Amino acid sequence: MKKLSLPYEGWLRTAVLILWTIELLALLNGDKYTSFLRPEFGIMLGAGVLFLSGFVICGFFHIGSSRPISLNSVIRSLIIILPLVYIHNTDSAGLDRFAFSNRSTGLPVVSTGNQADSPDQTAPDPEYAYNSNSGECRPTEENTEENRDKTGDKELTIKDLYENPDKYAGEKVTVIGMVASDKELEEEFGESARFLFRFVITCCAADATPLSIVMPDSSRFKAEDDEWVSATGTFEIITRQQESIPMLKETVIKEIKTPSSPYLY
Amino acid sequence: MKTTREISVISETYKYLPMLSAAIFISAAMVAPVILQNQNHIRTFSLIFSSIVLEAFPMMLLGAAVGGIIESFVSKEHIGRLLPKRYPWLSIFIAAGMGTLFPVCECAIVPVVKRLTGKGLPVGAAVAYLLGGPIVNPVVAMSTALAYRSDYTVVALRLGLGYLIAAGAGLFISRIFMNKSALIVDAYHDERHAGHTSHINIQQSSSGNSNSVPQSIFIAEKMPDLNCTHAGHCCCHDHENTESSVIKKLISSLSHAADDFFSVAHFLVIGAFIAALAQTYIDRKIFLEFSSHLGASSIMMIALAVLLNLCSESDAFIAASFKGLMPPSAQIAFLLTGPMLDLKLLLMYRNLFRKRAIIILSSFILVIIFTISIIIQIITGDHLLL
């Protein structure tokens, strides 16, 4: 009796490689991969596409010499393509309050005093993040066309406030981020206190670290958890239990669309 | 009392149990994100799982490509010439520091080391490079300095202790496995050589000599039932001896690289899946509960390093975020553990080492790192320079 001939494992492996090649190309198209990775990692993904293409081409030539398909190889291949389901399931909004509450380790703390001697000269000036006369975000005279970066107006970020807290202390600033409520925060600052947070990533979303500022009085505005907002207020640093806590007082909130890049780098 | 038939039915069931479990798990894992996509925790999990895989995949492909090139272009004689003959243990100390010349992340290093061991690199040197390569390198030094705001004490401790642990592990493993093999590569090669012998036997049998190998196993045009996909010939010998064309060698290296990719990729995915579960569902504040107890903080940070599966270029920033919350000794333990031993690495080691060797190596790493962190905590207390 003739034995049933199974298809070659090479077909399965080549199919898996093709799926992954298509997925990486789709992620590179329109920079969709920045939902997961730092922008610079696009080069690595491009290199991955090249390697996979080489494997696919090589695989086509060796299909006939591979062993018959087995249950083991099917299971292994399914495991390898499992991430594709999750990549497709992810939107571009980035990490939210759920991740923030798991990753934050208490009230936010900034380092003060060190920056006074050597302030970061490249950090945006507070004036051109917020214009107190007009009440709008407008660039100052210093922020001429020559000084603007390629993406347009320089934006003051929560990261800038963390890196140069003394420079911005007492100034009116505008930053964007997501809103989060927290029981520990409410116990410390009252029921209306909220966090304004954003994630900083080094390589990928797995190493994302939340940076947050306390907004002590949210009764002046209505913002739900996980909403992206532009918050304007006076940046101050208060001391609690010998730690410097960043705060945004007299905050005015404006709801905004999710930014194209939800992370800071 | 069970009959022989009942026993064989039960053993057959147990034989298929792992595959059945894997099939159920894969089905559930594929369906869950689609059905539960509106749940915050599933969205977070999807993002983290995808991020870990997407970051690691290109590195692993690179490692597989390098391994393929080693397999096709580097001979055992080349490796033999490079190794110090007078003092073989010196190769371990050299290998532990090779990351300074050939920096590589932990995802890429496993396929590279696998091919190097196949070319005759001693297991002690292989272990030293495996552990030392991802930590003793300029990229990690720079990222650590950046994370700790140019505090070079931390950089020196991380790289120096990492080097010593890698070299120590290499010496330890080479001593423990002096007479037995720690590597599954040897078993892999043994099977290949058995296959090669059988080819000879088949040829002899066709001329009338006896052989003990059934002819149905080996067909001249097809490969032996191993991870070998080269058409038409056995692949148990060094390729550079039989294929002189550079193009053929490149094609051969791609084929080997694809083999390595498929032998390791599923371990990476499983490790990333478990790590993403830990990252999504474990609140990091839990780890702070134990920060004041001697040794407990180190254990917590070591466990965190194993669970988080971060690359060695970025874990310094996570460790630095625990400044003021965890003692410096615990942060050092975190910085040392991650590049040497995390979930995905533990699984990827299964492609290189026997189970017993993995258990011994992992235990050695964990015990040594814990001991070092306790010594640091005792010597300096909590008032370290960090």
Image (cartoon, rainbow, N blue to C red):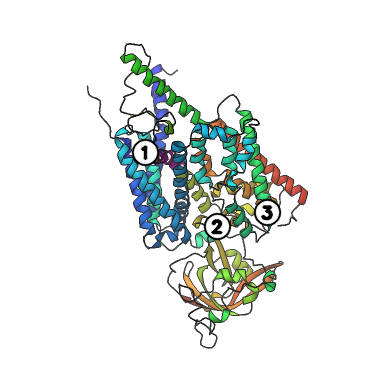
Magenta: predominant secondary structure element?
Answer: helix
> Is residue B194 a member of the stretch shown in magenta?
no
**Labels 2, 1: one chain:** no
Q: Residue furthest bottom?
A: A133
| Observer able to see residue B26 | yes
Splitting the image into 4 quarters, where does residue A189 fall?
bottom right
Of the two numbered discs 1 and 3 on the same chain, state the one appearing first in sequence: 3
Camera-nearest residue between B17 and A113: A113
- The kind of residue on which mark 3 rests is Val
Q: CA distance from mark 2 to mark 1?
A: 52 Å
- The kind of residue on which mark 1 rests is Lys
Q: Please name which of the two marks, 1 or 3, marks the residue nearer to the observer.
A: 1
Residue under pointer 1: B248
Say which chain tag 1 marks: B
**Labels 1, 3: one chain:** yes
Residue B282 rendering spot, x and y as whole percentages = 55, 52
Say which chain tag 2 marks: A
Say which chain tag 3 marks: B
Camera-nearest residue between A188 and B357: B357
Residue under pointer 3: B154
